[in-house]
Image (tube, coloured by chain):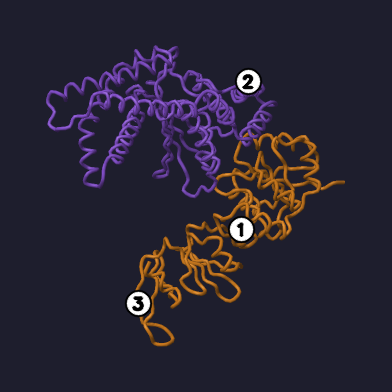
Chain colours: A orange, B purple
Amino acid sequence: MMTTLNILITDDEAPARSRLRDLLADMDNVHIVAEAKNGKEALDLAGELQPDIVLLDIRMPEMDGIEAAQHLQKLPKPPAIIFTTAFDNYAIQAFDMNAVDYLLKPIRFERLQTALKKAHTLLPRQLAALTPLSPQRTHLSITERGRILLVPLTDIIYLRAELKYITVRTAEHEYLIEESLTHLEQEFGDTFIRLHRNCLVASAYITGYEKRNYDEHGEKQWVALLKNVPETIAVSRRQQHLIRQ
Amino acid sequence: MRNLGIALRMLIIANTALALVAYTLSANLADFIQKIAAISTLAQPILLTSLFLLYGCYPLLKKLSYQQGLIAVLALVLFSATGIYSFFAQFWIFSDLPALSRVLICAFIISTITLYYFNLHQRAHSPAVSEARLQALQARIRPHFLFNSLNAVLSLIRSQPKQAETALEDMADLFRVLMADNRNLVPLAQEIALCRQYLALEKLRLNERLIVQWQIDDMPPDALIPPLILQPLIENAVYHGIEPLANGGTINIQIYTKQNEIHLVLKNPCSTQSNHHNGNKMALNNIKERLILHFDLEASLKSNQENGEYEVHITLPHQKQNS
């Protein structure tokens, strides 16, 4: 006997969701746990309902399917992912090359059935291959008590590398993420500037620079003043040319 | 002919020719300036009078064949040259007024050059060449739209078969136009009807996310425009402006006439960090090129992004049927 597959539908278009609902209704051993209208909703619902499979549209507002898939991997029990798309040459090429499951809209009953049977979670290699399709994430994600917590990129004031982790600072909170500062700098180079070897600061949150009196050599040092938080960020000697700009 | 751009080009060609004449005749810079001043005193009034005469006689000239027109234009220029010359002959302040015959030869040569230029220009832009260009520039609809719409129709078949029927009919009409030979101008009202059918299909998918405001009360429905000028713009607005917004937005379409020109203004919200604008550029260039092929300098397309709003403004001459 087959176990029931729990499925989460994600698509921004109501008719597309209703079409999937119709197709799934004709199948045995499947259960729709919820429907999401974009990647962000899918992440919330997936954390809560732990579906086995997420049907994920690629082009969606708020957060696209590719980015959602990246965040979904952080769940303790990541769901299998099947992408759906009407037309997206780049994505389809990447899917084919990396054996990622996808369905072309309009979706056929038989294709959906086959896809559900062989669905599996994305491998790290596949995930890495999909990253270029969504070149800049709109959120960073942190797993907290089995749920995914999304931090909007626009809320982040600075990112500071500390030992194994990176501290993500927003006006209200600090979070720890496991990523590399160099990768983050490459991804978000146009919003953050590197003021120090271990620190990326969002240029939108820098209110000014000041010469202050601390430093291991007893010399005066430049620091960046930030909006919404009391602390300052030291500007390393090598980056001082940034202040003049 | 009755167009500022064309008049300006005539002036530039004529003046360049005059400057060349002055240059060959003169020994040094001072001499050159003096010569050009002397020539201009006589030549500029001739040039301007000719332009005014041509402008005034345009309705008459239009009725002639190209051959007859050529002769008429040359005659007009020579007539104005003779007129101005005799006027100057009475009140001439310079000592050396050139002989009338030489002035006339000069005017004749310059007019011929100008006419030849426009003939070349015309040939580069019309019938055979532009037919081929227009064929190649057939507007293409996004596959994205086709497949998503089919998907939406499929979703309706079980629950709302009536609505599915209408949607398929709309799709059939839309694709008939897209696949038709689109080289001839069509009435504006026809393009609007097509746009409405297209929007009905988009509405099916996007529902309340898509709001369209039409401000077309002052629109001349019988004005002739190239087909598929507006539809691709609306398609872009939906794809780049509305779809990325979770709560949707409004597309505003305004059409009005002003001083014998038709203005089509389309506005849609745009997100600041939209990074796929290549498709948009392609559609815009396609429309721009078709406008040039049909109307040359008399039509224009401008796009502008400001305060989270994207605007495309098309201006084209008001052409009525059978004119």
Q: Which chain carries label 1?
A: A
Q: In which quarter of the image is residue B213?
A: top left
Q: Which of A126 and B275 is in front in this view?
A: B275
Residue at mark 2? B169
Q: Which amino acid does label 1 sit on?
A: Ile
- Residue at the bottom extreme, as displayed: A217
Q: Residues within 10 Å of mark 2 (few under 14, many from 20)?
A: few
Tag 2 secondary structure: helix
- Residue at the right extreme, as displayed: A1
Q: Mark 2 lies on which chain?
A: B
Q: Residues within 10 Å of mark 1 (few under 14, many from 20)?
A: many
x then y, percent, for residue A15: 63, 33
Q: Which of marks 3 and 1 is in front?
A: 3
Q: Which amino acid does label 3 sit on?
A: Lys
Q: Nearer the viewer, residue A15 or B124?
A: B124
Q: Nearer the viewer, mark 1 or mark 2?
A: 2
Split into 4 quadrants, where in the image is the C terminus of chain A?
bottom left
Q: What residue type is labelled 2?
A: Glu
Q: Quadrant of residue B199?
A: top right
Q: Which of B60 and B150 is in front in this view?
A: B60
Structural distance between the alpha carbons of marks 3 and 1: 40 Å
A16 versus A230 height, above or below: above
Callouts 1 and 2 close, C-beta under 8 Å: no
x then y, percent, for residue A83: 69, 46
Is residue B264 something that shows in the picture? no
Q: Which residue is depicted at the point 22% across and 29% down?
A: B98
Whichever of callouts 3 and 1 sits on the residue coming sooner in the sequence is 1
Q: Residue A211 carries which label?
A: 3
